[in-house]
Image (tube, helix red, strand yellow):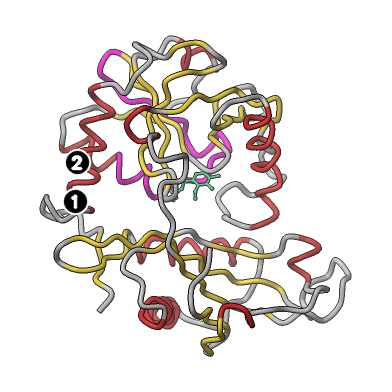
């Protein structure tokens, strides 16, 4: 993981020199709002996927945690493009973040300066090179997602990801590719960094915001695609066992894209391979990204 330069508060700093003091507030208390965005190359150029939605979510995450970002949405979007061009990237994973910097280490963070930074580098498939076709195995985590009104799930903020790390580490150490956490009521919430969909009798089901999920932007892409493919989508609380008896299941996320789930807790999902509805949605999703289908939802923004 490397590239040429990282944008920090208006300046492009060489990758190796982009450092902060070890006592920055974010390092100790997780006070850092961030985004994960992908830029894809297709024959027409390099395009950022759902750029504005991601940058709006970044500012919303900062707002929820009262981190006052000094930049407007437009300024941040221009800075991301500047970073991509400076790094001469054709495809990239983009990580803009807004964090509380170095001043004092009390829990009152208001005196700490707010630092805004943007990194971008090349990144392949998140769950392994075969995951999109062959699917992944998951376990239901022994860790739950936080209760309502504890950690705000709608905010994509570093502190929330300690929970995700527990879910991920447990899954990996137990020989699974990914973990899925239940909410405090025992219903399916989400993967460590992905939303979950189940297919049952031709209908798509996914947990609602009240199941302690990050309302994913890829999840929203699936809503749009499914509608045009004539597939009904229902946001519904889902019991754990609905995954065991699903016809198909898949995970969505900027990093994971649309990844089939073939096994849950060692139980085979459907026929234990990527199902036809998952494949249809993948085809429509990547068709737009690769420039093979018209970008009818306005998902792609050209970099230059
Ligand atoms: C906890 C969590 N849930 C869901 C998602 C999927 O969100 P998106 O599709 O916007 O990347 C992510 C990834 O950002 C995540 O970290």
Q: Residues within 10 Å of mark 2 (few under 14, many from 20)?
A: some
Q: Residue at x 60, y 72 (%)?
A: 98
x then y, percent, for residue 62: 59, 66
Q: Which residue is mark 2?
A: 284
Residue 230 against residue 246 in the figure, above or below: below
Query: Mark on residue 66?
Result: none
Q: Does the magenta segment cover residue 71?
A: no
Q: Residues within 10 Å of mark 1 (few under 14, many from 20)?
A: some
Q: Is residue 287 left or right of residue 165?
A: left
x then y, percent, for residue 20: 72, 78
Question: Magenta residues?
Answer: 201-222
x then y, percent, for residue 15: 57, 78
Q: Residue at x 43, y 81 (%)?
A: 79
Q: Quadrant of the C terminus?
A: bottom left
Residue 71 against residue 156 in the figure, above or below: below
Residue 162 against residue 134 in the figure, above or below: below
Q: Residue at x 31, y 68 (%)?
A: 90
Query: Mark on residue 288?
Result: 1
214, 66: nearer the viewer: 214
Q: Residue at x 39, y 24 (%)?
A: 249
**Real-space Cα separation, disc 1 to disc 2, in angstroms:** 6 Å
In what element is the residue under mark 2?
helix
Q: Is residue 66 left or right of residue 238?
A: right
Q: Are marks 1 and 2 in contact (CB under 8 Å)?
A: yes
Q: Does the magenta segment cover residue 216?
A: yes
Q: Residue furthest bottom?
A: 11
x then y, percent, for residue 188: 54, 26
Residue 142 against residue 212 in the figure, above or below: above
123, 56: nearer the viewer: 123
Q: Quadrant of residue 110?
A: bottom right
């Amino acid at each position: 993981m490397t590239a040429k330069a990282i944008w920090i508060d208006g300046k492009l700093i060489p990758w190796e020199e982009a450092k902060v003091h070890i006592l920055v507030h974010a390092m100790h208390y997780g006070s850092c709002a961030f985004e994960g965005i992908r830029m894809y190359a297709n024959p027409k150029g390099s395009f950022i996927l759902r750029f504005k939605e991601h940058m709006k979510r970044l500012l919303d995450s900062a707002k929820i945690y009262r981190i006052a970002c000094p930049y407007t949405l437009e300024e941040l979007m221009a800075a991301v493009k500047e970073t991509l061009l400076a790094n001469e990237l054709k495809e990239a994973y983009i990580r803009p973040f807004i964090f509380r910097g170095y001043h004092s280490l009390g829990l009152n963070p208001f005196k700490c300066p707010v630092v805004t930074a943007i990194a971008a580098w090349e990144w392949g498939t998140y769950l392994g090179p075969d995951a999109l076709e062959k699917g992944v195995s998951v376990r239901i985590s022994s860790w739950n997602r936080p209760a309502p009104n504890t950690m705000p799930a709608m905010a994509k903020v570093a502190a929330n990801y300690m929970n995700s790390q527990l879910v991920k580490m447990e899954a990996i150490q137990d020989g699974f590719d990914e973990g899925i956490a239940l909410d405090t009521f025992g219903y399916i919430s989400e993967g460590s960094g992905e939303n979950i969909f189940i297919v049952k009798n031709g209908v798509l089901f996914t947990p609602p915001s009240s199941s302690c999920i990050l309302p994913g932007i890829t999840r929203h892409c699936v809503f749009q695609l499914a509608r045009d493919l004539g597939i009904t989508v229902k946001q519904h609380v889902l019991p754990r066992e609905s995954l065991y008896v699903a016809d198909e299941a898949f995970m969505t996320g900027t990093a994971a894209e649309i990844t089939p789930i073939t096994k849950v807790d060692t139980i085979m999902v459907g026929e234990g391979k990527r199902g036809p509805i998952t494949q249809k949605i993948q085809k429509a999703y990547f068709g737009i990204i690769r420039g093979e289908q018209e970008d009818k939802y306005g998902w792609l923004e050209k970099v230059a």
